[in-house]
Image: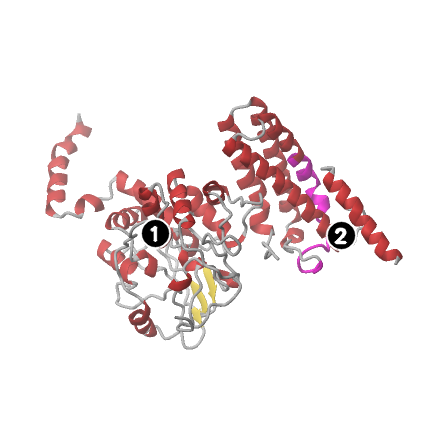
């Protein structure tokens, strides 16, 4: 008897909440939103940069070092701890951080945080991800200060950087190229690769100021995380993965086995474990479909990109 | 002259051994470079089995019985992994041929050999699944073996070398 009572008033309250704000229905922290958010969390690869696995740190409590040509970044704490994590944030703060790279206190993030890709995330994905992140155990761990090379320690430069290289915008996949059969799958793949799973952030070379070279998108990066070269994943037959079938790509993303029967190690093994291996078969197929329809980039990943403006 | 003959003789024996599908444990006589070469050939053989099983699962080419046989051979290789990694054959020691074996292998030898043993156990599970002939179970056992068998060594202990 007693346990039935709340539903008598809970239903009208929920309806009111839904009517009061269009967003409320998505941000009520319902079990559905949390479950969807967990999937978004995997697809967005948050775990990797926000968890210090090597130092046996708590999940999402930050501290993972990301070594780049600009210095070493440390992923911050994104657990709901009010003092050290994002417990004091609102969905609006969270959306602004992902879409525009601006923290609640108004400071700009470094582009090591892939807001240049996350800017294309859908409202629904952001709200669901937020619902999920609220359910993670709070960890009172203080963030480490980034250790950056001169002059990148001047955070205000990020504002200048953004003015030069960043346009916040919803993601528009455009039309698939000729020959793509499943257009819906291609569009989903485009969204995953370009926005949510932000593949280009590691697989594209960066210019002198750290902006992704859009002219070599996904064409490999001589200096990826930890200073290692990251392969060209466009369908160029020699330089890229032109010889891989859609099945080869999907298998690789699921279990880490490449076309030679060899197994991934390093940073991609982490991505497979925490991101692509946790996606649905359909999403892996979508990524494969999108990658295979990309314009092939004729560029060896070990060759540094020409300086910006060095080619027309 | 003699030395060159000895090396080419060794290579020939190695080639025959690899062609015959057997795995040689490195003898005391093998130089670190020869050991690295031998283990790379062995890993290629292992990769060949993995590829063939994947092809079977994707296209039906081959047979479940063939998968079972390959699973047994993978198990044999797994059993020989510790002997293929004698001390002094890591990427920090051997430059010709280049090796991707991290020095951590010898710092965490027990974990390393446990991982190789794990591959052996998973290959037995794949053999069982393949003998049963249910493709879904074969696929599951194959993926489990790849991800947590092969992967459990490649993730912590191997650096992927650039293809030349």
Nearest the eye: A307 or A268: A307
Per the rendering, the mark at residue B34 is 2
Per the rendering, the mark at residue A196 is 1
Quadrant location of the N terminus of chain A? top left
User: Label 2 vs label 1: CA separation?
Assistant: 46 Å
How many residues crowd around disc 2 within 10 Å: few (fewer than 14), some, or many (20 or more)? many
Colour pattern: secondary structure
Nearest the eye: A52 or A249: A249
Residue for point 51% across, 27% down: B135
Q: Give the quadrant of residue A35.
A: top left
Pinpoint residue B78: horizontal percent, then vertical percent.
66, 39
Can see residue A247? yes
Q: Is residue B81 magenta?
A: yes
Does residue A296 appear left or right of residue B152 in this picture? left
Does residue B105 appear left or right of residue A189 in this picture? right
Residue for point 27% across, 56% down: A94
Residue A60 vs A254, above or below: the answer is below
Residue furthest right in the image: B2
**Does dot 2 land on a helix, a strand or a loop?**
helix
Pinpoint residue A43: horizontal percent, then vertical percent.
37, 47
Quadrant location of the C terminus of chain A? bottom left
Task: Tell me where the magenta segment starts and ends, as one range.
Answer: B74-96
Task: Check the residue under mark 1 and report the chain it is in.
Answer: A
Nearest the eye: A121 or A108: A121
């Amino acid at each position: 008897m007693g346990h039935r009572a709340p539903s008598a008033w809970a239903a009208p309250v929920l309806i009111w909440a839904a009517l009061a704000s269009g967003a409320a229905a998505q941000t009520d922290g319902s079990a559905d939103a949390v479950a969807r958010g967990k999937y978004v969390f995997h697809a967005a690869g948050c775990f990797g940069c926000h968890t210090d696995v090597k130092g046996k740190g708590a999940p999402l409590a930050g501290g993972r070092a990301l070594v780049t040509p600009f210095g070493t970044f440390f992923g911050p704490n994104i657990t709901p701890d009010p003092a050290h994590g994002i417990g004091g944030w609102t969905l609006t703060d969270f959306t602004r951080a992902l879409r525009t790279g601006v923290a609640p206190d108004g400071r700009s993030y470094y582009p090591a945080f892939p807001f240049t890709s996350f800017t294309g995330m859908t409202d629904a994905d952001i709200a669901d991800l937020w619902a999920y992140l609220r359910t993670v155990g709070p960890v009172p761990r203080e963030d480490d200060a980034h250790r950056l090379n001169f002059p990148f320690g001047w955070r205000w430069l990020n504002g200048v950087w953004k003015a030069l290289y960043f346009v916040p915008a919803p993601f528009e996949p455009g039309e698939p190229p000729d020959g793509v059969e499943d257009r819906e799958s291609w569009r989903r793949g485009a969204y995953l690769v370009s926005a949510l799973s932000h593949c280009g952030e590691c697989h594209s070379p960066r210019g002198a100021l750290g902006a992704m070279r859009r002219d070599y998108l996904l064409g490999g990066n001589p200096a990826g995380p930890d200073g290692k070269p990251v392969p060209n994943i466009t369908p160029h037959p020699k330089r890229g993965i032109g010889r891989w079938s859609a099945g080869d790509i999907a298998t690789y993303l699921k279990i880490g086995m490449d076309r030679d029967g060899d197994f991934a190690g390093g940073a991609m093994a982490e991505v497979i474990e925490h991101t692509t291996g946790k996606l649905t078969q359909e999403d892996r197929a979508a990524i494969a479909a999108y990658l295979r329809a990309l314009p092939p980039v004729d560029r060896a990943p070990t060759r540094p990109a020409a300086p910006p403006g060095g080619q027309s | 002259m003699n030395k060159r003959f000895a090396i080419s003789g060794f290579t020939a024996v190695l080639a025959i051994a690899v062609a015959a599908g057997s795995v040689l444990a490195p003898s005391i006589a093998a130089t670190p470079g020869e050991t690295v070469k031998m283990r790379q050939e062995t890993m290629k053989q292992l990769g060949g089995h993995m590829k063939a099983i994947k092809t079977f699962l994707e296209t039906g080419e081959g047979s479940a019985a063939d998968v079972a046989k390959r699973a047994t051979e993978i198990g044999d290789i797994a059993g020989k992994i510790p002997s293929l990694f004698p001390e002094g054959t890591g990427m920090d020691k051997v430059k010709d041929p280049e090796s991707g074996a991290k020095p951590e292998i010898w710092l965490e030898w027990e974990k390393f050999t446990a991982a190789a043993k794990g591959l052996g156990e998973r290959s037995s599970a794949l053999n069982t699944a393949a003998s049963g002939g249910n493709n879904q179970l074969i696929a599951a056992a194959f993926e489990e073996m790849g991800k947590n068998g092969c992967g459990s060594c490649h993730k912590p202990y191997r650096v992927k070398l650039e293809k030349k």
